[in-house]
Amino acid sequence: MTATHLITGGASGIGAALVERLHDRGDILHLLVRTPARAEQVTARWPRVHAHVADLNHPDRLAEELDGRLPERLDSVVHCAGVIVLGDIADQSVEQWKVTLAVNLAAPAELTRLTLPAVREAGGHVVFVNSGAGLRANPAWGSYAASKFGLRALADALRGEEHGNGVRVTTVYPGRTATAMQEETHRQEGKDYDPSKWIAAESIATAVLTALDMPRDAEITDINVRPGR
């Protein structure tokens, strides 16, 4: 049976690398994208993709935006979308905290809630692409790390709650990965960006696929990926 996946952040970076691999093997893909223009871009690039416009900045709107548009059976939901705003805690505004926590934590929680019936129906998998910042917090990374620590807690709790329903849950903790988000992170840090120094997005996609393709007698709960250079 052809597998069906729902992916956020699939238009670029790690998400796009994963979509490319899944599309090549003939799976059915549903992507959440920010704008109609982005929806046109992804469907032009990947003919079998179903693009749904939804705003992760407003998790409270997701139920209405996606009402009647999601499949009844999902083999996986993969959360790849994220935002980062660096800054000392003394300097970050409430608005910056709200955006970071909405996109990186509240939206994944709400989307997981909305899709759980379909994932349970398939005996499927929820994958959270987290960050090394979900394991440790460094100066100027407080709001981002807080959102990622929370995402780790979400995954751990979900795993315990859904194990009896046949749902597998995996968290992937990538180190610095050569994506547009990493380029933006370097800009905020005031550093030169050299993508050759960091993990290729395709390597993180391989880690996600390893978890998804694991035989049903096992579950990969956490994958920590560090740069090899």
Image (spheres, rainbow, N blue to C red):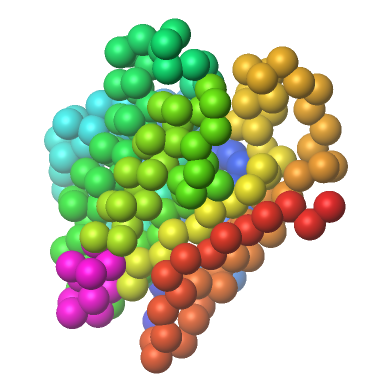
Q: Nearer the viewer, residue 92 or 122?
A: 92
207 relative position to 172: left or right: right
| Residue 46 image position (x, y, % from top left) | 56, 50
Q: Is residue 28 visible?
A: no
Q: Is residue 128 visible?
A: yes
**Residue at (25%, 27%) from the top-left corner?**
58
**Residue at (56%, 73%) from the top-left corner?**
210
196 relative position to 160: left or right: right
In the picture shown, does residue 44 fall above or below 162? above
| The quadrant where residue 119 appears | bottom left
177 relative position to 146: left or right: right
Q: Nearer the viewer, residue 83 or 25?
A: 83
| Residue 205 image position (x, y, % from top left) | 60, 59
| The quadrant where residue 178 appears | top right
59 relative position to 151: left or right: left
| Residue 76 image position (x, y, % from top left) | 37, 64
How many discs appear?
0
Q: Which residues are magenta?
A: 158-167
Q: Residue furthest bottom?
A: 217
Q: Does the magenta run of residues contain 163?
A: yes
In the picture shown, does residue 35 fall above or below 203? above
